[in-house]
């Protein structure tokens, strides 16, 4: 099978990220500013983590690679797994999911949009997950009495692939900043998903949403039930209102809550109360204690 798993940004840069372990250690001494990043955040989003897509400098070559990769996965690998013919709806489904990335999974709505039965749709979703194109994020559940939304959220496994499916390039991002939010949330979530596999903590990932609308984009939960909440904002300015979901989680979880972080596009770490921080996006892949060779 051709199916590949994209690299983390730290792996691309030759360092091993330590963010997750620092978050669970209740780390509060963040560097004053992230180091300069020659690749830039937008470049990281649009290139993604597939080595073959990072190398081509020309946009048309990168897009050609993504197109060929998706075609091979859907026409050969999926058919190999399922041993069936005629999966003509899968490209349409993948494109539809790209437009709804980081939204709650609604099988009824997807079924209506594609005009296929939910039983068939669920089978197709299983195939997309098996080929690592789509990654579900389950809802965090608790026995603390709060009514929570239980539907999972979906993300694609790579923002370069997501940008290709959406037809997004640097020019379009500059013209329409509304596209940045979904790309960033997908990016942060998948970076954390990769980092979790080699962290000491090795947390599970969830999302949090109450039926009254309070939500947190990502929850990391360790084996002892301790929680770190993470929000993703595309703004370079953060206010106390951006911490509403994290404060709701903090109140609900009590002593289980280690800390909450809002990743944003600004340049400095800013405290917003006990165990609450706004952090620059670059802290996702930059080690505070210096570079270290990646484990292979």
Image: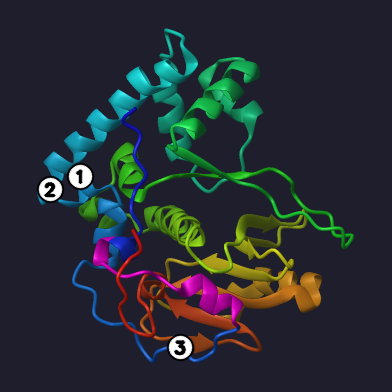
Q: Which residue does the numbered mark 1 point to in the structure image? A: 52
Outermost residue toward the left in this view: 58
Q: Is residue 197 above or below residue 258?
A: above
Name the N-terminal-most of marks 3 and 1. Answer: 3
* Label 2, label 3: how far apart the Cα atoms are: 34 Å
Residue shown at 64% from the left, 44% from the top: 152
Q: Residues within 10 Å of mark 3 (few under 14, many from 20)?
A: some
* Residue 231, percent from left and from top: 55, 67
Kindly check if marks 3 and 1 are in contact, taking CB atoms under 8 A apart as contact.
no
Q: Which residues are magenta?
A: 12-25
The front one of 84 and 234 is 84
- Would you say the residues marked 2 and 1 are in contact, meaning their CB atoms lie under 8 Å apart? yes
Q: Which residue is mark 2?
A: 56
The N terminus, quarter of image: top left
Q: Taking 80 as reference, is 54 above or below it?
A: below
The percent coordinates of residue 159 (x first, y second) are 36, 49
13 part of magenta stretch: yes
Residue topped by disc 3: 30
Q: Secondary structure at mark 2?
A: loop
Disc 2 and disc 3 in contact, CB within 8 angstroms: no
> Residue at the right extreme?
145
């Amino acid at each position: 099978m051709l199916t590949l798993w994209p690299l983390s940004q730290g792996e691309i840069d030759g360092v091993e990220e330590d963010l997750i372990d620092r978050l669970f250690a209740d780390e509060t001494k963040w560097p004053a500013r992230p180091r300069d990043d020659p690749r830039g955040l937008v470049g990281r989003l649009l290139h993604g983590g597939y080595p073959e897509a990072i190398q081509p400098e020309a946009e048309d070559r990168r897009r050609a690679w993504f197109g060929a990769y998706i075609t091979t996965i859907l026409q050969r690998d999926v058919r190999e797994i399922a041993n069936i013919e005629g999966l003509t709806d899968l490209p349409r489904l993948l494109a539809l999911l790209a437009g709804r990335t980081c939204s709650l999974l609604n099988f009824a709505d997807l079924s209506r949009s594609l005009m296929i039965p939910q039983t068939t749709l669920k089978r197709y979703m299983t195939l997309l997950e098996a080929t690592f194109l789509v990654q579900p994020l389950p809802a965090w559940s608790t026995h603390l009495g709060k009514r929570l939304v239980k539907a999972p959220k979906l993300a694609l496994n790579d923002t370069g692939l997501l940008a290709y499916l959406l037809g997004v390039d640097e020019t379009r991002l500059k013209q329409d900043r509304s596209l940045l939010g979904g790309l960033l949330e997908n990016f942060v979530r998948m970076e954390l998903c990769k980092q979790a596999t080699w962290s000491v903590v090795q947390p599970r990932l969830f999302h949090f949403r109450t039926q009254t609308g309070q939500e947190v984009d990502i929850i990391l939960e360790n084996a002892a039930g301790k929680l770190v909440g993470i929000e993703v904002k595309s703004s370079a300015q953060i206010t106390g209102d951006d911490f509403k979901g994290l404060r709701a989680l903090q109140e609900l979880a009590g002593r289980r809550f280690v800390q909450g972080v809002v990743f944003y596009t600004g340049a400095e770490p800013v405290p917003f109360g006990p165990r609450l921080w706004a952090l620059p996006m670059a802290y996702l892949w930059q080690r505070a204690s210096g570079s270290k060779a990646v484990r292979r």
